[in-house]
Image (cartoon, grey):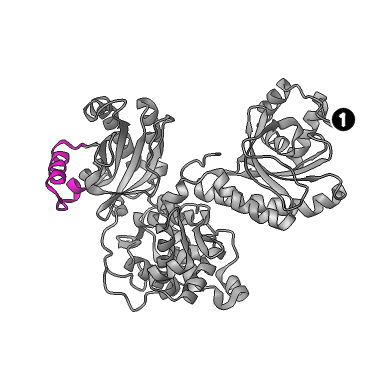
Amino acid sequence: MATRPVEAVGPLERGLAVLRAVVAGEGGRRGVGEVARETGLARATVDRIATTLTVLGVLRTEGRELLLAPGAAGLGNAYLDSCGLPALLGPHAAALAERLDEPVSLAVPDGDGVRFLAQADRRRALAFAFRPGDLLPAERCAPGALFAADDGRPAGDDGFAARVREARERGVAVDDQLIEPGLVSVALPVRDPAGAVVCAVSVAGHTRRRDAATLESLALAPLRETAAAMETALALGAVPSGEAPVLGAVPPGGTPGPETAPPRETPGPGVVPPGEGAWGAARSGDVLKEELGAGFLRSLARGLDVLRAFGAVRGPARLTDLARLAGLPRATARRSLITLCHLGYVREAPGGFVLLPRVLGLGHALLSALTLPDIATPHLVRLVRTVRESASVAVLDGDDIRYVARVAGSRLLHIDIVVGTRLPAYATSMGRVLLGALPEAERDARLGRIVPEALTPRTLTGPGALREAVAATAERGFGWVEEELEEGLRSVAVPVRDGAGRVVAALNVALGAGRCAPEESLAVLLPQLRETAGRISADLAAVGRHAPVPTA
């Protein structure tokens, strides 16, 4: 690494070191003491960094352990949004996967490795997947040979050198079980209008279905068509011609000057609406500093704000725009950029600064593997500690709801339901929330085929009454069921939304109906439910911005 610049921001350097140490732990989990030993930082320093990153939603804590939190996905999302490749090329990869019935991946060079950006999967019992953010050695995968052939880097062992020569001559690379037994793939380069390789598209398969030669024979022609379509998309897309080559990480070059372009009041044509980040709606660093005092490292938060600001700009970003998007003085943003360049997360390029795929190494692959239950459960734990009642998340499954996450309450008398339980949607608060979120025509068709059964004397069974109850639930934004599923059981539910605002699940609290008056339950529970649903929805938006989050 180059000599440390005198203007580098120490708290930002140390904060990213702590984050990397946590990511390196098993499943993105590390004890505070272990992080201190690995980073060489004082325990008190790690505690302050952990406090800051926890407030920002990048980490969370369980006892004396630090865990990667879904909010950290905002860092990797900034790169994926800035480079624009998943948005521009992802649909073509998905179409190829559908055509060949095999997984298709996009990858970029990252130093001596290959970083995967996206994968269009196929559902099979024998499945494999490269998660966005996964890093593979260049010499052990097909894209690595393509990138080495393009940039002229010296190959390592004789086998890799031969594959690089073949890739240079043929314009195609094959992985015949280099990564693991049974896995084969074929890759082609995707070039920008200037002819530089910006990424590789690869089709993967398993030798149980076809060997490497058969896969190449089957996939090469469709791959060529797809690569050509991707190159057309790049030419017509928002990434300026000639700028895409800087998507691959290279040794940081130089440091940013006082200003990289003449200041202007409004962003240029490269600026696009920012994505949902880890703490996009959070209180400002100044407010948090005032509230938390010495426990909050404002310069660390500001540095991460600058990093995330790249997500609002397609292609190279100017210092002026990054400072404006992060809400910081140019001098402050410049120091953060100097630090990020020094650490290899950013490089200076013609027209501004470019975020590099190394940012995906800050936990993006781990977060890409999270499911809805993984994301929801920590929030359910917090909710149950507050209200002392059982809380659950469910999804619509046919005419039923299916519980996908649940935390039991702390009272002696609590509702005994386990994950996987199915209940009729018409008689549950979560079911009415989920039914109410359906398009009107689909909702009417669904309710038209349901034949309600009187589970208790209070169950709504008349078609008209049920339709009115579901419509009322949709209009007021929460579900309420009083002793319709089971006598003595009361339930309140609210919707959980994804990043596009679609209702994908429902969150509820269930309690004994005789514990207090209905109005009291609603006054106490509804604000807590809405706040928790908002937190779950924000995490879903961050984790699911570039890949769908499985419901189980």
Q: Nearer the viewer, residue 267 or 59?
A: 59
Q: Quadrant of the N terminus?
A: bottom left
From the top left corner, tell me how far across and down residue 483 is, in percent: 83, 37
Name the residue at 62% across, 53% down.
Answer: 379
- State whether residue 195 is above or below residue 104: below
The region drawn magenta spans 148-173
Residue 462 point in image, percent of width and height = 83, 24
Residue 83 relative to residue 214: left or right: right
Q: Would residue 81 be visible to someone looking at this image?
A: no
Instruction: Check residue 34 for magenta coloring.
Output: no
Position of residue 18 measured from the top left corner of the image (x, y, whole percent)? 43, 66
Residue 306 visible here: yes
Q: Quadrant of the C terminus?
A: top right
Location of residue 291 in the rendering, given as x and y in whole percent from the top left corner: 62, 73
Residue that label 1 marks: 457
At label 1, the amino acid type is Pro
Q: Is residue 421 left or right of residue 489?
A: left
* Mark count: 1
Magenta region, mostly helix, strand or loop? helix
Q: Quadrant of residue 454?
A: top right
SS category of the residue bearing label 1: loop
In depth, the one of 85 and 546 nearer the eye is 546
Q: Residue furthest front?
A: 412
Q: Quadrant of residue 338?
A: bottom left
Q: In the rendered view, would you say 54 is above or below 380? A: below
Report whether 445 appears left or right of 375: right
Q: Residue at x 28, y 31 (%)?
A: 223
Q: Give the vertical position of 39 relative to 386 (above or below).
A: below
150 magenta-colored: yes
Question: Residue at 46% of width from left, 64% of height from top?
Answer: 304
Q: Say which of 363 and 504 sits in front.
A: 363
